Amino acid sequence: MSDASVTFFKGRFCSFHEAQVSVRSKAINYGLGCFEGIRAYWNPEAKQLYVFRPREHYERLRQSCRILHLNLPYTVEQLIDLTAEVCRRNHHREDVYVRPLVFNNHETLSPTLTSDPAEFALYTLPLREYLDTSKGVTACVSSWRRLTDNMIPARAKPTAAYLNSALARHEAKANGYDEAIFLTHDGYVSEGSAEHIFLVRHGGLLTPTSQEDNLDGITRRTICELAGDLDLPVTERRVSRTELYVAEEAFLCGTGAEVTPLVEIDRRPLGNGKPGPVTERVKDYYYKVVHGSVPKYAAWTHAVYA
Ligand SMILES: Cc1ncc(COP(=O)(O)O)c(C=O)c1O
């Protein structure tokens, strides 16, 4: 990442190395903030960069701020415009990850919230794959439980909740897996460390609801909507741990993870231990949609260049 890349911070565009916070910031000391993860896809045929579902991401960011008493000083429209402007100023002609961050940047000692405007930062990073979407990944059920909605709500995408994710991911990696799957406090399937999970059962898609201490996922919602075009029935309900082991196929999904096949869970190969045909169909269709190649979903993609 070049230090010269343009970042938006403290109400102006600056270079990445100028966007600094103090070690006294409450955001660093107590994790008082929330964020979004958005992708923009470069379409070489159209010579266009498409931000995928920015409205939904910024509506979710506003809801997160509401939950966390963070006073976000921008409207959804302004945030969409800012995103496109940072991408343009960075001359991105590649796939990009966009990270808007809202945080309490006060420097007093106590972990308190305030009604002052929160600090807002937005940076971009070129990003291709977050996980191996071609070969797929292995996962384990984590010994760490998902934080509950009454502790630190995953729904609010709070920075602090990613300690829970990091602990689970670290444990998974240390034990030779690529990813971790969280169970809720009640023992039902919640989500991955930064992804949602879908199972293929009896030829249809099965996924936990958005009340399982997970994020209200935009990719998850997208896939539920796209499944109809692929004649795949979707069931949203509580999912038991052992249903993971008897699924025909499974995949993780998310803005970062896109559609990543799960080829093994807790040392039990799924299908023949390779990405399955239903997963591949969903993945291929998802890629077409996010690249702005399916006219029906053009409204989901926001063109950056005129
Ligand atoms: C904990 C968690 N779950 C799921 C997801 C996927 O959500 P979305 O599809 O809205 O990016 C993310 C973020 O990407 C996440 O951080």
Image: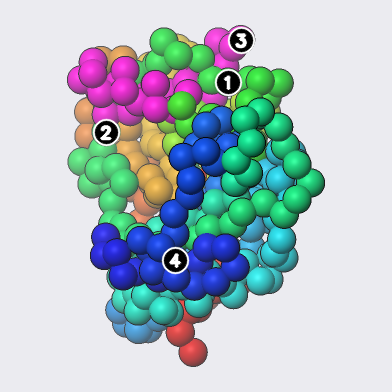
Q: Nearer the viewer, mark 4 or mark 3?
A: 4
Q: Is residue 283 left or right of residue 79?
A: left
Which SS class for mark 3? loop
24 vs 207, nearest the viewer: 24
- Which of pointers 4 and 2 lies earlier in the amino acid sequence? 4
- Which of pointers 3 and 1 lies earlier in the amino acid sequence? 1
Q: Residues within 10 Å of mark 3 (few under 14, many from 20)?
A: few
In magenta, the rendered stretch is 164-190
The answer to whether any part of residue 116 appears in the image is: yes
- Which of pointers 4 and 1 lies earlier in the amino acid sequence? 4
Per the model, the C-alpha gap separating discs 1 and 2 is 24 Å
- x, y percent for residue 292: 45, 72
Label 3, ligand 1: CB separation under 8 Å: no
Mark 4 lies on residue: 7
Q: Which mark is residue 137?
A: 2
Mark 1 lies on residue: 147
Queried whether the magenta region covers residue 149, the answer comes back as no
- x, y percent for residue 296: 56, 71
Quadrant where the N terminus lies? bottom left
- Which of pointers 1 and 2 lies earlier in the amino acid sequence? 2
Q: Amino acid at mark 1?
A: Leu
Q: Amino acid at mark 2?
A: Val
The answer to whether any part of residue 196 appears in the image is: no
113 vs 245, nearest the viewer: 113
